[in-house]
Image: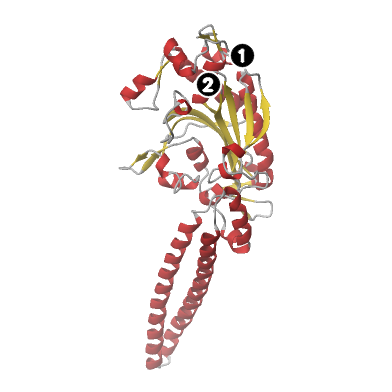
Amino acid sequence: MLTLKLLRDDPEFVIRKLAVKHFDAREIVGKIVGLDKNRRDLQKELDSCLAEQKQKAALIGGLMKEGKKAEAEAAKSEVASLKEHSKELEAASEKNNEELMSLIVLLPNIPCDLVPEGKDSNDNLVVKTGGHTPELGPDALPHWDLAKKLDIIDFDLGVKLTGAGFPVYKGKGARLQRALINMFLDINTKAGYLEVEPPVMVNEASGFGTGQLPDKEGQMYHATLDNFYLVPTAEVPVTNIYRDVILSENDFPVKMTAYTPCFRREAGSYGKDVRGLNRLHQFDKVEIVRIEKPENSYAALDDMVAHVEGIVNSLGLPYRILRLCGGDLSFTSAITYDFEVYSAAQGRWLEISSVSNFESYQANRLKLRYKDAEGKTQLAHTLNGSSLALPRVVAALLEDCQKDGHIIIPEALRPYTGFDII
């Protein structure tokens, strides 16, 4: 959530920067600025009213002692009138503030200066490529056919049990899932990230804190009886650990990692782009989250990008890193780097990670603050990244590592799988 101070001090800057995200903010910002002025005017009037009320109330006792009953009664009447007026001002202020908040949450985060101009994913900037694209023979199969042939993932059984987008992993397929999760968590914890195991259901306050609500209700599974939401990513519960927390300078950096199943109502067309593991409603993901002082957050972002790149390199998959353009940037992000691996059998790039800096946007919603060296309370910066999302990693591993109808497990993964080949 953007701060009122920024909106009040430089509304044109906000409007100009949000245009990079193709978001027309002029009308909303204008209303916010007007409501903010009303808020301050109402508060000033309320403070004056309460001060006058207190002053006149203090006179009543003295007037009664002096025998000035008529004047005391007049003062009582004035105090009663002031109390009624203060209630009216408080009600007006509350209504004004509710309207103000309802508009502020409609504004996305401001993109940082590094974000390139662009309308959609076609305009994203490739900043780095790595790995080697395998040369597959004419008999190479896409992962959905390989999974069926090797009997390691059953998509039809998932449809029977739940519906499309909920595969069943079997035998070495299930073992491969567990191996990847353990490998990713081990790499993260060795890099200083504290492993946590959070709930996979969160309340509305947690969804609001990280920006999923009120923006992505349609993508989240909602348990309406308890008003809980299934997590779309571990970012939500892990970051919310620090909701309403004031850190000290000695607490930084905060580095956490977690594995959770993730749940999303993915929308999309039919065809190979959403076939198999390419798009699921339930999937496994390991996440890294950092909380940093503002002056350190971009160095932390670079460190997180390098960290995720190291994991991808360890799997030996061809990859590229993209800096997302304004039009492809998420609602809450100030800057995002996407990692994609190349699926040789499908002939396309598959996204496996997003690493983002939200600057103070989430922290303002979370009331996540710290005391600086001068004792002043400041908003922290939050960051997160997938390290990694499993479905498309598995898809690329199956397709790029296939040989003579089998899957050759990357060497770094073998201590976790306990086998070299599927």
Image location (x, y in percent) of residue 196: 51, 32
Image location (x, y in percent) of residue 47: 50, 74
Is residue 66 or residue 239 the one in the foreground?
Answer: 239
Is residue 117 or residue 7 the one in the foreground?
Answer: 117
Q: Where residue 77 is drawn, which disc sits there?
A: none
Q: Is residue 192 above or below residue 21?
A: above
Crowdedness near tag 2: few (<14), some (14–19) or many (≥20) residues, C-alpha within 10 Å: some
Crowdedness near tag 1: few (<14), some (14–19) or many (≥20) residues, C-alpha within 10 Å: few
Q: Residue at x 38, y 38 (%)?
A: 221
Instruction: Determine whether, in the image, residue 317 is placed left or right of residue 406.
Output: right
**Residue type (three-letter) at the residue carrying disc 1:** Glu
Q: Residue at x 52, y 61 (%)?
A: 27
Query: How far apart are labels 1 and 2 at the CA level?
Result: 13 Å
Is residue 379 or residue 233 the one in the foreground?
Answer: 233
Instruction: Determine whether, in the image, residue 4 is placed left or right of residue 167.
Output: right
Image location (x, y in percent) of residue 206: 45, 44
**Residue type (three-letter) at the residue carrying disc 2:** Gln
Q: Secondary structure at mark 1?
A: loop
Dot 2 corresponds to which residue? 346
Dot 1 corresponds to which residue? 135
